[in-house]
């Protein structure tokens, strides 16, 4: 696992097991959690990119050699730990962008779905193929895919385990954008750099509101929106941004304060 600062405010986590197509095992999840601990404590982080080493795969699923030896109880523990880990991406206060080159299968598709945006290369391929191993998705795929695409289509993809190429993924709404493979990293970095100029307080509030609102009744979500709207008015960033708009100047915002 590699954690690096690419530009001011832009950090990247890279799953670094290219010899096994970045397949996930317990050690990978532990290292990913350690990286997320550092991200949470670092007030310089404005945007987080997530990618895989090499050109062949983002993450080609969980490590089957590792999973084959698991008992039922160990499999439940592994799934729970993976779900806990991936859920941390939605809990981060900064935007998280998946950059998907090559295969995003099983746990790789689930990792991408855990991010706020998915940018894919024109050579990307997504699938939840667990059914071919007589199991089902264990890191959130059955739930996040349903929320992304709806029940019927998600059922089809999980039950058949079929591959979804990037052009179809875009049409289905699984990914946000598709780019030529050799320009994906540049496109992701440009999007991230643009986000670093937005108010980190507004971005954090938007992310929290929209994630919370997705799973509650509309009337409750609208009430939550009004409350969140008011909270943004109570912050200094709103004054800075509105004055800059009136002055036709560029607003500059301070980072979110992080706890150690």
Image: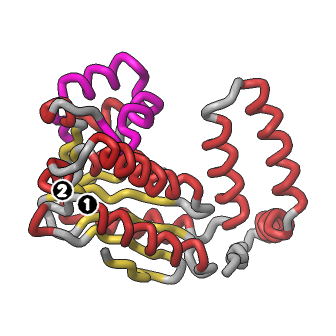
Instruction: Look at the image and tell me whether residue 178 can be seen.
Output: no
In terms of secondary structure, where does tag 2 sit? helix
Instruction: Determine the image quadrant of residue 134.
Output: top left
Whether 5 is drawn above or below 215: the answer is below
Instruction: Look at the image and tell me whether residue 36 can be seen.
Output: yes
The span picked out in magenta is 137-165
Whether 246 is drawn above or below 176: the answer is below
Spot occupied by residue 116 in the image (x, y as percentages of width and height): 48, 51
From the viewer's side, name the closer residue of 243 and 258. 258
Residue 30 is one of the magenta-drawn residues: no
From the viewer's side, name the closer residue of 26 and 2. 26
Spot occupied by residue 70 in the image (x, y as percentages of width and height): 23, 49
- Image quarter where the N terminus lies is bottom left
From the viewer's side, name the closer residue of 132 and 158. 132
Horizontal side, residue 16 vs residue 73: left or right: left
From the viewer's side, name the closer residue of 113 and 237. 113
Q: How is the image coloured?
A: secondary structure
Q: Which residue is mark 1?
A: 25
């Amino acid at each position: 696992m590699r954690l690096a600062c690419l530009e001011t405010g832009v950090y990247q986590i890279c799953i670094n097991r290219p010899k096994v197509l970045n397949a996930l095992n317990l050690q990978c999840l532990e290292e990913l959690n350690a990286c997320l601990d550092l991200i949470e404590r670092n007030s310089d982080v404005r945007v987080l990119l997530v990618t895989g080493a090499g050109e062949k795969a983002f993450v080609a699923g969980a490590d089957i050699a590792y999973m084959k030896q698991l008992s039922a109880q160990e499999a439940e523990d592994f799934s729970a730990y993976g779900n806990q880990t991936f859920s941390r991406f939605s809990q981060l206060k900064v935007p998280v962008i998946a950059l998907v080159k090559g295969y995003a299968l099983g746990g790789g598709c689930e990792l991408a779905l855990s991010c706020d945006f998915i940018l894919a290369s024109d050579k990307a391929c997504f699938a939840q193929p667990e059914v071919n191993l007589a199991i089902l998705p264990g890191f959130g795929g059955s739930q996040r895919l349903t929320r992304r695409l709806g029940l019927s289509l998600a059922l089809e993809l999980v039950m058949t385990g079929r591959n979804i190429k990037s052009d179809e993924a875009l049409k289905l709404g699984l990914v946000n954008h598709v780019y030529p493979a050799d320009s994906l990293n540049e496109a992701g970095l440009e999007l991230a750099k643009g986000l670093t100029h937005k108010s980190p307080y507004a971005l954090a509030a938007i992310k929290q509101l929209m994630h919370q609102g997705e799973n509650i009744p509309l009337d409750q979500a609208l009430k939550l929106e009004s409350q969140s709207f008011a909270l943004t008015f109570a912050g200094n960033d709103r004054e800075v941004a509105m004055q800059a708009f009136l002055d036709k100047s560029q607003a500059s915002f301070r980072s979110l304060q992080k706890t150690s």
